[in-house]
Amino acid sequence: MRYIFLSLAFFFNTTTLFSQTKINPAAIDIVRDSFGVPHIFAKTDAEVAYGLAWAEAEDDFESMQQVVLPVKGLMGKVLGKAGAAGDYAFALFRCREITEEKWNTLSPEFLKLIDGYVQALNHYAVTHPNEVLHKNLFPITAKDYIASSVLALTVFNGADGALQRIFTNKEWEAPELNKKGSNSAAIQNTKTTTSEAFLLINAHQPNTGPQAFYEAHICSEEGLNVMGGLLAGGPCILHGVNENLGWAHTVNFCDRLDEYQLEMNPENSLQYKFDGGWVNLEVKTIKLHIKGIPIAIKRKVYWSKYGATMKNKQGFFSIRLGANMKIGALQQWYEMNKAKNYTEFYAALSKQELSMFNIMYADKHDTVFYINNALMPVRDASPEYNWKRTLPGNTSKTLWTNFRNIKELPQYINPSSGFLFNTNHSSFLATGAADNLKPSAFAKQDGWEQYHLNRSVRFLELFPQNEKLSYEKFKEIKFDKHLPSVLQYTYKIDSMFLLSESDYPEMASLITTFKNWDKSAAAESKGAAIFLLTYEHLKKTLAGQAPRLITKTEAIETFKYVNNYLQTNFGKPNITLGDLQKLVRGDKAFPLGGFPDVLSPQWTAPYKNGQLKSIGGDGLIMFVRFAKEGLPKIETINMYGASAKPGNKHFDDQVQMYLQQKTKTMTLDKATVYKNAERVYHPE
């Protein structure tokens, strides 16, 4: 279910049945560069949004459709039983209802943008009927579009995990660690050898599907000129760079969601106690349509004062979070796209419609900024309640109704150390030690992250805090494939390095190779292959256990597992990581370095013959340099290419560059884009 839910990530589709102004495609230019990246030029923002939707549909219409399926109750019809979970969640979290309730909070300018975007989707569906996933999906409306964004952010904020826990009768506990994630960094110009400010944009996403980053450039005569990455169905740039500033997102894991167990009335199974009285649960019956099942399946969805409510063997449980209380996240991103300076950018953030994400910022005026952004509930501070566990759902004391003001969130601007970074670790470890915020200055019940990860420790090992940073070193840090000197994984494997080869002759070669490993995740490393199999094995066998050192017995068992795996699948105990792990695109497979929680990471799934293939990792990488005058200098690389369609020459034309840690030069300059264009055409 998590895959289906996360397929809804960040950005989402929709379109209007009756448009305010019909877009003329002839007024829009889609300019494809030599890598197939679309640059969209038009007079108005709405026309640019139309061109963006059309260009991405040409490259990956399937993913764009997948994110809007739940709005029409079609996810189960298209994707089967697992997809029905998305349809159920859309109803459970009242995404349609909150959209209707808050619709008038959206600005006319933003609605014009969305109107242009959805017109293009509907038009593309009409002109490409063979690509449409279900006959009842189109047309879609602007309200469909916004409602799908509510579901997507609700899920991304942890609602999918909450539903799974309730469904499987497990105890809720707030998140602590996550080894998947992203990298971001902002460096002031006084800290660099080139006297330019640097920005790293590097979200770690799935390689394919609705969560895979799509690279684009949008430029209008109404203030848009921005390049960066978006996910399927995004009407503007999710994170990237405009003429004056840039920003990057990484996922944060502060405690934005609470779960409650309701105290039910023994005399009435649909009443719960609240502040001494009995209150009726709101109940609605929905119909789920599932591929391969000829009749609709009826399910009940419940709602309490706390929000979306489910029933399991232990009773009724409610889920409360800010993400399904707001509908303006896409509008906030649009305003971030158009910001010209830090003041305007912070004003956009201050709308507090975007419910999550670390945000890293740099600009041409030498401002660097970082905020651990969240719709953070204002909770009761008394020790009576443990906000990291399931809470009593019978009192107004646990029913928070407000969020912290943006000024109350952890944030930095221009620290004396000259740099800021985040790799999904603690915002209290974001810069030089003297400039770091103190956890004691923030409410304990907010659950802000307070840990390092391998990537954050390694970044600090590599970063020259006492001297200036060169651009070459900046790129080298991002592409680094070494673990830090002291590993930060949940389960410590020290005991594996203490075993004596002479005691285990059948595994002596394997143990020696591992003990001599330099903690590199390079494709050529043999120790890295052993480590990746160790990591995957312990992740499964120790799942759910508290962080700890593995025992000697577990170390021996792990070596036996790895040895058997290698002998069975490869006929020898020592292979390189590139022999084991592949970057697969179509029918091509390439040796691949990296593994979870190195700065240039990968995470994998089974491929064939015992090999593993990357299913997520670097995605889109952007390096940005800001001088005080002129446009920013931009270099990017995508793991695959601009198109998701096999046979397209841009399906895999960036693979070799990525493997060689090379980048392509990009620009916001309109004249240069047209001069170097591979193709210029209208979206029609």
Image: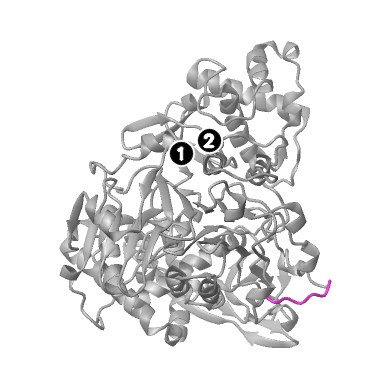
Relative to residue 406, is residue 570 drawn left or right? left
Q: Which mark is residue 673?
A: none
Q: Secondary structure at mark 2?
A: loop
Secondary structure under tag 1 reads: strand
Circle 2 residue: 594
Q: Nearer the viewer, mark 2 or mark 1?
A: 2
Q: Is residue 294 magenta?
A: no
Residue sitting nearer the eye, 82 or 382 = 382
Q: Badge 1: how crowded within 10 Å, few (<14), some, or many (20+)?
A: many
In the depicted view, which residue is nearer to us: 175 or 443? 443
The boundaries of the magenta stretch are 377-383
| Residue 513 screen position, x and y as percent | 63, 18
Above or below — where is 567 with respect to 73? above
Q: CA distance from mark 2 to mark 1?
A: 9 Å
Location of residue 241 in the rendering, given as x and y in whole percent from the top left corner = 44, 60
Crowd tier of the residue under label 2, counting other residues whose Cα lies within 10 Å: few below 14, some 14–19, many 20 or above: many
Q: Is residue 115 left or right of residue 246?
A: left
CB contact under 8 Å: marks 2 and 1? yes
Q: Quadrant of residue 242?
A: bottom left
Residue 324 in picture, x, y percent from top left: 53, 74
From this view, report whether residue 400 is shown above or below residue 626: below
Q: Earlier in the sequence, mark 2 or mark 1?
A: 2
- Which residue position is annotated with label 1? 614
Q: What residue sits 29% from the left and 64% below the top?
A: 53
Amino acid type for the residue under numbered disc 2: Gly
Figure quadrant of residue 655: top left
Quadrant of the snapshot with the C terminus: bottom left
> Please, which residue is most extreme toward the right here?
383
Q: Chief secondary structure of the magenta span? A: loop
Q: Residue at x 73, y 56 (%)?
A: 450
Q: Amino acid at mark 1?
A: Ser
Residue 187 in view here: no
